[in-house]
Every structure is written in structure tokens, then in C-alpha cells.
Image: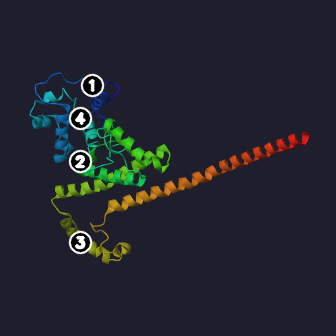
Amino acid sequence: MAKDGSTAATDGTTTGSGDIARSLELLWGTGDRPSRGPKPGLSLDRIVTAAIAVADAEGLTAVSMRRLSTELGTGTMSLYRYVPGKAELLDLMLDRVLGEPLPGATGHHPTGTGRTAGADHPSEAPPADWRASVDAMARTYRENLRRHPWLLKINQARTVLGPSALRGLELSLTGLRSMGLRDPELIGVIVTVNSFVEGIARTRADAAEAVRETGLSDQEFWDNQRPYLERAMLSGAYPMMASLSEDTFSAEFDHFDFGLRRLIAGFEALVAERTVAGAVDGAPDRAEERGEDRAEDRAAEGTTERTAARK
């Protein structure tokens, strides 16, 4: 909502683009609830659940108040008694899916700011080792994006923070605390991991969308280009590419696992660097303390000797 109280136009894919105050009231349960309604059993929970189901099946653009009224068997205006519109509904959908437990999940569950387990699952705890926490954060977030690919279509630059988002950030930071990094750096680790996962997931989602839109399989697509690529490789103009092995672009190569391992290795190097630096930085202080102790001992010895001499 703009400063003048008006609501800016939105395509329904940007979080926080509606009435932020109302979204927060609905997320945290502080707003007034409808006292009665024409459709028994209708609730905000059912509306959000239906919206997520439609988005999962047909994409975010298919979600509309009219469509949801059909799914729920109620009038469109009845829905507005529970949620102001699609913009606020998106905030609720996001907090819900980022806090839902994955099948078989026992630890981390990712969210928009620290994508981990939601507020409804307080017993869940991150792995004790920060490496395992990073691994769990990445893999569970990837699974969540697979279940809800429409998440990749949302602009989460300014997420309206609900219970699940905050619980997620809390668990993520708890799992990373043993890294010994500064607070901004811990957030940097989370942002780096989430950005990596989103990049890999977006590539996969884009590939699937390309098949749907073109009607061509990957094999058919590359078969069309093969004659041109073969001539280009034989021309001598691309010696490096011509020297690549046949399995260079194999679908069997796990880019996600490769990238995640490299990320963890990079974090390990940073943690080791900070550990060494901390030891070096602390050395002068400890030496100074030892020097002060020795000076005090010598002073005490001198006082004792002078006292003995006077006697």
C-alpha cells in the first residue's frame, strides 16, 4: 500500500504489494475474524489451502478470487470477508508453504529469509554440525521448490514476515552459529545457499516450461541443432569446445550436488581462516596477560625481599 493509502497496481507476484498491515494481522492472528458467513465451514485456512492447490497444479496466474470461489463452492464476495485480495493471499500462501513439513523431514525446512522449519513445528531442530545444516537447508529448499514451482515466480525481495518465516530464520541461524562468523556473514551464508538453490531450481523449471511451450523434447530440440554444431566443431574456430568429451553435457552429472559441495568447501575455508585469525589475534592479549602476571610476581617478590631486609 502506498503512503497515501492507495494500493499500487500489482500482477500478484510480489510479496508485500497489498495491504501490509492486513497481511500481518492475518499472519499473526491479531485481526478481527468474520463473526458469521453465508458458507458454513469456510475459513481462511481453507482459502489458503485451495489457493496453494491451484497454484501447484496450474501456476500462480491461475489463482484468482473467482477461481477460488468455484473451488470452494461459495460466492466470490464471501472470500473478501476473510482476505482483502490476491496480494494479501499471496503473503499467506508464501508463509504457509515455507513452513510446511516435507514428507519424511526431521530437521531444516526452508523459508524466504532463512528457509527452514515453520512455527508449527517447534520441536524440529537443525543438525548439530553446521555443514549438515547447510546441506539440509539446501536440499529441503530444493524439494520445496519442486513441490511448489510457483515460488520461483514470486518477487520475495521484501517478504512480509509471518511466524513460519521467523521460525525458519531462527532455526537456520541456530544451525549455523557454530561457524563462528559475524552475524551479517551468517545471513550471507543463508542468502548464498538460497540463491544457489533457486538458480538450479529455476534452470530445471525453465527447461520443463520450454518443453511445454514448444512441444519439443530436449532430444528433439538438440537434434535440430546437431548438424550446425557438428560443422562448427569441425571448422577449427572452436578448438576448446571441440576437445570436450562426449559426456560433458550429460544429464547424469549432478550440478546441484557439485555446487553444494563447493559451497560447503568454501565456507569451511572461511571458517578455518577465521579460526586461525582468532588464535593469532588473541595471542598478544594472552602474552600480555602472562607478562602482567610475571611483573606482579616480581613486584611481590621485591616487596617480600625488602620487608625481610628491614627485619
Q: In which quadrant of the rendered view does residue 115 lie?
A: top left
Q: At 27% across and 72% down in the image, what residue appears?
A: 229
- Going by the numbered disc 4, the residue's amino acid type is Leu
Q: Which residue is mark 3?
A: 226
Q: Look at the numbered disc 4 and give the secondary structure of its residue.
A: helix
Above or below: residue 165 compared with residue 256: above
Label 4 Cα neighbours within 10 Å, binned few <14 / some 14-19 / many ≥20: many
Q: Is residue 113 visible?
A: no
Label 2 Cα neighbours within 10 Å, binned few <14 / some 14-19 / many ≥20: some
- Going by the numbered disc 2, the residue's amino acid type is His
> How far apart are the two marked residues, 2 and 1, measured between alpha carbons?
28 Å
> How far apart are the two marked residues, 4 and 3, measured between alpha carbons?
47 Å
Q: Earlier in the sequence, mark 2 or mark 1?
A: 1
Give residue 15's position: percent from left, percent from top: 30, 38
Q: Which residue is mark 2?
A: 148
- Going by the numbered disc 3, the residue's amino acid type is Arg
Q: Is residue 258 visible?
A: yes
Q: Which residue is mark 1?
A: 31
52 left or right of 187 in image: left
